[in-house]
Structure formats: C-alpha cells, structure tokens
Image (tube, rainbow, N blue to C red):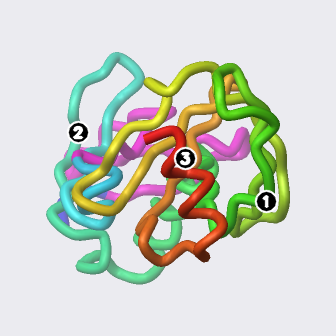
C-alpha cells in the first residue's frame, strides 16, 4: 500500500501519499453500497478526485480497515427493518411504525415510489425525513409484516 490514513485533531481523515503530500478531509465512498458493500471502495478528496481505490475492505490491515469502517458508519446511517409494527393507512402519505436493528421508530412514507426493490427480495424505503431504511430479505420478515408491506408493493 502506497498511502497512509489517519484522523487529525478535528476528526477528519487525512490521506498521506508515498511522496509526502497530505489531503485533509478525505471521504471513503462505496462503489456498490447495497449490492457489495465491502467491495470496491474509493478514497476521495474534498474536490471529488479519487486518491486511492480499494478492491476489498477486508483485504486492508486491521487499523486502516477500522478507520475506514468508522468513517463509513458515521456517514451511512441506514437502519435495517426487522418488523413492521403498524401502518397508519394503506394510502400515502402514511405513518409507519417499524422495529429496526437500532430500535423502534416511526417515519412517514410520502408515496409508494419511495419503496425501491433491491434484487429479488430486498427493499430500500426512503422516509419523508430523508432516512433510508433497508429490508434485506422481505421473505424473512414475519407474516404480519409481509402482509402490511405487500399492500404497498
């Protein structure tokens, strides 16, 4: 690896090239955030230029992998829906109460177009507040959740 990555006192990622140049405020960007989140990652400067390409996150040394994973986790807040508790109405907009991997929450689904299919069984649900919720496998949800969800698909 011909670069070094560290966090400065302000909490920003600093990318150091082999030649000694430093780029402050580097951002890791996933090429395929939903389909292959640990494959194809780019380290991008503040002006949008790619500084380094990483084929696989798990191929990096431990400290570097941890640093990048921390930054990605802070930037990519995407709760996973585990169960639909209730839906206020079967027309939109509607208020959904869901149980996620981060606890129970409510959000507004503005329109049915805010539910996108991911592959054959996954879904991405955009709330009215701008948070994206993921359903990795809708077939793995309990029966009541699947029935509620089917009304919108």
**Where does the image place residue 52, in percent across and percent down from the top left?**
20, 47
Q: Are marks 2 and 1 in contact (CB under 8 Å)?
A: no
Residue displayed at 55% across by 33% down = 126
* Circle count: 3
Nearest the camera: 112 or 125? Answer: 112
- Residue drawn at the location 59% of the way across and 61% of the way down: 80
Residue beneath label 2, please?
51
Query: 4 or 94: which is nearer to us?
Result: 94
User: Furthest-bottom residue in view?
Assistant: 62
Tell me the number on the disc at residue 85: 1
Residue at the location (30% across, 50% down)?
118
On screen, residue 45 versus residue 135, left or right, reads left
Q: Is residue 88 left or right of residue 146?
A: right
Q: CA distance from mark 1 to mark 3?
A: 24 Å
Q: Earlier in the sequence, mark 3 or mark 2?
A: 2
User: Can residue 123 be found in the magenta stretch?
Assistant: no
User: Image check: 110 left or right of 52?
Assistant: right
Q: Residue at x 43, y 41 (%)?
A: 153
Q: Secondary structure at mark 2?
A: strand
Give the labeled residue for mark 3: 76
Q: What segment is highlighted magenta in the picture?
A: 4-31
Q: Where in the figure is residue 91, as x and y percent of width and height? A: 65, 25
Q: Quadrant of the N terminus?
A: bottom left
- Assess whether residue 22 is covered by the magenta stretch: yes
């Amino acid at each position: 690896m011909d670069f070094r990555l560290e966090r400065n006192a302000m909490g920003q990622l600093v990318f150091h090239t082999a030649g000694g140049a430093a780029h402050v405020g580097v951002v890791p960007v996933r090429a395929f955030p939903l389909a292959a989140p640990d494959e194809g990652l780019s380290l991008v400067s503040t002006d949008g230029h790619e500084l380094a390409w990483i084929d696989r996150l798990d191929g990096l040394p431990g400290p570097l992998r941890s640093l990048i994973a921390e930054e990605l986790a802070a930037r990519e807040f995407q709760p996973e829906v585990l169960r639909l508790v209730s839906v206020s109405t079967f027309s939109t907009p509607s208020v959904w109460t869901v149980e996620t991997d981060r606890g129970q929450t409510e959000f507004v689904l503005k329109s049915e177009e805010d539910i996108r299919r991911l592959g054959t069984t996954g879904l991405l649900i955009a709330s009215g507040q701008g948070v994206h919720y993921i359903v990795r496998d809708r077939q793995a949800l309990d029966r009541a959740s699947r029935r509620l969800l089917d009304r919108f698909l």
